[in-house]
Image (spheres, grey):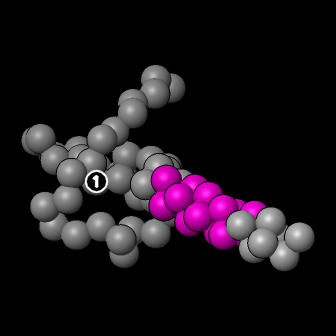
Amino acid sequence: MKKKFFALAVALVMVAGIATFALSKGVTYSGKVAKVKGDKVTIELKKGDASKFSVGDSVELEIKEK
């Protein structure tokens, strides 16, 4: 009985660790365009923490019509 419980606990910890890693990759930010100058766009975030970005990061935008 103890071996089964231990194996189940180990499996649960492994699944939780993998799920946490997978979910951390899909972070979503949302905001509004504040300024457009040439080919540069400034976005003010409403959801998310901008401190995680740094110069040179790649960003993918999803544009929604008004």
Check disc 1 and report the residue beneath it. 42
Q: Is residue 50 left or right of residue 7?
A: left
Mark 1: few/some/many CA within 10 Å (<14, 14-19, 20+) = few
Question: Would you identify the image quadrant in which residue 47 lies?
Answer: bottom right
Task: Give the overall secondary structure of the magenta segment.
Answer: helix
Is residue 37 left or right of 34 when viewed as pictured?
A: left
* Count of marks overlaid on the render: 1
Q: Is residue 11 left or right of residue 2?
A: left
Q: Residue furthest right?
A: 1
Q: In the figure, residue 52 lies in which quadrant?
A: bottom left
Give me the residue at 28% from left, 53% from top: 42
Q: Is residue 64 above or below residue 43?
A: above
Regarding residue 31, the answer to whether it shows in the image is: no
Asked which secondary structure carries label 1, the reply is strand
> Is residue 13 highlighted in magenta?
yes
Q: In the image, what residue occupies the spot 34% across and 39% down?
A: 61
Residue span colored magenta: 8-22
Q: Amino acid at mark 1?
A: Thr
Relative image position of residue 41 (x, y in whole percent): 24, 47
